[in-house]
Image (cartoon, rainbow, N blue to C red):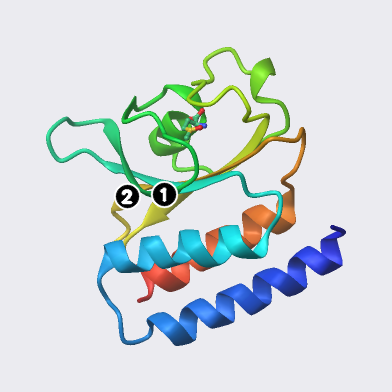
Amino acid sequence: MNDDEKQKLYIAVRSSLNSILVSTPNLISRMATINCLLSEAFPHYYWTGFYLLDENKPENLVVGPYQGTMGCLHIPFGKGVCGTVAATGEAMIVDDVHALANHIACDSKSRSEVVVPVWDGDNNLLGVFDVDSTELASFNEVDKVNLVGIMQDMFSNP
Ligand code: SME
């Protein structure tokens, strides 16, 4: 899929999410629906889901709604891509997860990923949104920018 096709699909998914979820403020429903529409739309999405702040353990993430093979349940801040994004608040694209020293191998089929932070309307971190692909270098700025925008629509300016 080239970048133009990707961008068009993201615009379509983003607009569907905005119209479907306008009357659904529940965060878990929003997360589940985001996972569903994005993973249905994009063939390169192998694992799609949220890691949320663990209310029982500071500076730790716990798995939230996802679609795909079984994800790791707990990820400490700073560990792997998700933990790094939670610690820094900066989105990350990883072309080859095997080249990353502290990558967490929940599923050995995952080869590349994009992870973006999820903020609420008061700028508090809720968690991260993680997408993994079985191919190398599946994600680029088009994915990152659109995913950041979707998270803002759904959780920062709901
Ligand atoms: N990819 C993540 C771990 C979670 S899963 O792949 C489902 C990471 O390295 O942070």
The amino acid type, in three-letter code, at marker 2 is Leu
Residue carrying label 2: 125
Residue closest to the far front: 69
The crowding category of the residue bearing disc 1, from other C-alpha atoms within 10 Å (few below 14, some 14 to 19, many at least 20), is many
Front in this rendered view, residue 126 or 21: 21
Front in this rendered view, residue 17 or 39: 39
Observer able to see residue 92: no
Label 1 element class: strand
Comparing marks 2 and 1, which lies closer to the viewer?
Answer: 1
Q: Is residue 106 left or right of residue 32?
A: right
Label 2 element class: strand
The crowding category of the residue bearing disc 2, from other C-alpha atoms within 10 Å (few below 14, some 14 to 19, many at least 20), is some
Residue placed at 26% from the left, 42% from the top?
A: 53
Residue placed at 64% from the left, 59% from the top?
A: 145
The amino acid type, in three-letter code, at marker 1 is Tyr
Image coordinates for residue 74, horizontal then vertical, percent: 30, 28
Q: Which mark is residue 26?
A: none
**Quadrant assignment for the C terminus:** bottom left
Return the disc, 2 or 1, that comes first in the chain's sequence. 1
As drawn, 83 above or below 102: below
Residue placed at 38% from the left, 28% from the top?
A: 72
Image coordinates for residue 59, horizontal then vertical, percent: 26, 30
Residue carrying label 1: 66
As drawn, 136 above or below 126: above
As drawn, 116 above or below 123: above
